[in-house]
Amino acid sequence: MTPQTKADVQQAALALNGADKPFVISATGDQIAGKWNVLDAKWYGIISQNKADQNYSITVTLDEATHTYTYSEVTTSSSSSVGLGGFSYEKSTFKGKQYSFNAGTLLGLGMQNKGSDPQAVGTATYSFDTGQIKKPLLDALAQAGWSEKPGFFKRLFGRK
């Protein structure tokens, strides 16, 4: 199979966007970027004010000369709370190839998630699976005749 051009691959990736998808894919230069705002919730507890968010991104860098690509993933999450017990804040970032699935429901007063209208008593339900964005994106690249560029150890030990 003759590999498709970079422009064709980027168009195939952009075709993965849709109103029913929780993520957005864009393409510029030699890159395809997928972003997913998984959670962005604010609510009140009994005697506290709380906030939690989680974001995921995947960046694919294309090498048209070899019809190969590399990709990296980043997941960030943070939560904060202010109440009688003081202020607490946590933030975590993970960079590297990953498979992650998590889901949950937050319950609170004045619940607001991802710009929705606040609810007097409400929930913010979220479900996140990196495979929902990564698999179709990498499958589109494979169907276009592109392959992942071997990493250091695969180059060192994987070839005969």
Image (cartoon, rainbow, N blue to C red):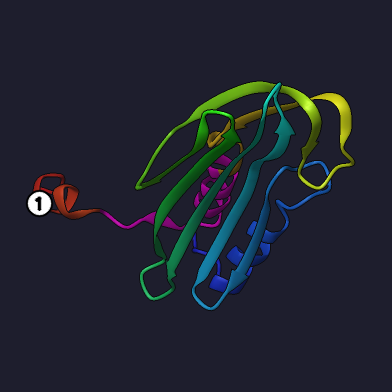
Position of residue 98 in the picture relative to residue 20 (left or right): left
> Residue 83: image x %, image y %?
60, 32
The residue nearer to you, when weighing 128 against 28, is 128
In the picture shown, does residue 113 fall above or below 74?
Answer: above
Would you identify the image quadrant in which residue 33 lies? bottom right
- Name the residue at 65% across, 58% down: 25
- Name the residue at 80% across, 26% down: 109
Position of residue 76 in the picture relative to residue 41 (left or right): left
* Residue to which mark 1 is pinned: 156
The residue nearer to you, when weighing 87 against 65, is 87
- Name the residue at 63% across, 48% down: 36
Q: Is residue 40 magenta?
A: no
In the picture shown, does residue 96 fall above or below 127?
Answer: below
The residue nearer to you, when weighing 147 against 51, is 51
In the picture shown, does residue 139 fall above or below 65?
Answer: above
Residue type pointed to by label 1: Leu
The residue nearer to you, when weighing 42 against 70, is 42
Q: Is residue 141 magenta?
A: yes
* Callout count: 1
Highlighted magenta segment, given as a residue range: 134-150
Within-10-Å neighbours for mark 1: few <14, some 14–19, many 20+: few
**Helix, strand or loop for disc 1:** helix
> Residue 81: image x %, image y %?
57, 35
> Residue 89: image x %, image y %?
48, 41
Position of residue 110 in the picture relative to residue 150 (left or right): right
In the picture shown, does residue 61 fall above or below 75?
Answer: below
